[in-house]
Amino acid sequence: MAEISRFFGIIIQMYGNDHNPPHLHANYNEYRAILEIETGEILMGILPGKQLKFVQVWIEIHKEELLENFNNFRADVQTFKKIKPLK
């Protein structure tokens, strides 16, 4: 699993060759969630409300980059780009 970004104690990661729909993994302390990139909705897990909002805003800002990373991870040559954190 590759770390894509880190901000406010939240770690954003993606797995190589992961399943659809395009998504990311967000970890904050003991909380874990999988969020759909297109909608920002939680597919599985839980995040505290404040951290969930941070991740959803960040997804909206970086949606194109996230989709590109997800597609690159699913390609034969699994590559990714780090994405700027939320400030």
Image (cartoon, rainbow, N blue to C red):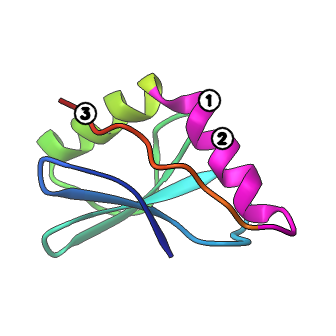
Which kind of residue does numbered mark 3 sit on?
Answer: Leu
Which residue corresponds to the image point at 33% horizontal and 28% vertical from the top-left? 57
Q: Which residue is mark 1?
A: 64
> In the rendered view, does 9 fall on the left or right side of 3?
left
Give coordinates of residue 10: x percent, y percent. 21, 56
Q: Nearer the viewer, residue 6 or 27?
A: 6
Residues at circles 3 and 1 in contact by the CB criterion of under 8 Å: no
Which kind of residue does numbered mark 2 sit on?
Answer: Leu
> In the rendered view, does 61 fall on the left or right side of 69?
left
Give coordinates of residue 58: x percent, y percent. 35, 32
**Looking at the image, residue 61 lies above or below residue 9:** above
Q: Nearer the viewer, residue 4 or 61?
A: 4
Whole-number angstrom distance, CA of label 2 to CA of label 1: 5 Å
Is-magenta flag for residue 71? yes
Whole-number angstrom distance, CA of label 3 to CA of label 1: 15 Å
Residue 86's mark? 3
The quadrant in which the C terminus is found is top left
Residues at circles 2 and 1 in contact by the CB criterion of under 8 Å: yes
Q: Can residue 84 be seen?
A: yes
Main SS, magenta residues: helix
**Looking at the image, residue 57 lies above or below residue 44:** above
Which residue corresponds to the image point at 31% horizontal and 41% vertical from the top-left? 55
Secondary structure of residue under mark 3 = loop
Is-magenta flag for residue 25? no
Give the farthest residue toward the right.
Answer: 76
Residue 67's mark? 2
Q: Residues within 10 Å of mark 2 (few under 14, many from 20)?
A: some
Q: Residues within 10 Å of mark 1 (few under 14, many from 20)?
A: few
Question: Which residues fall within the magenta stretch?
Answer: 62-77
> In the rendered view, does 50 fall on the left or right side of 23?
left
Which kind of residue does numbered mark 1 sit on?
Answer: Glu
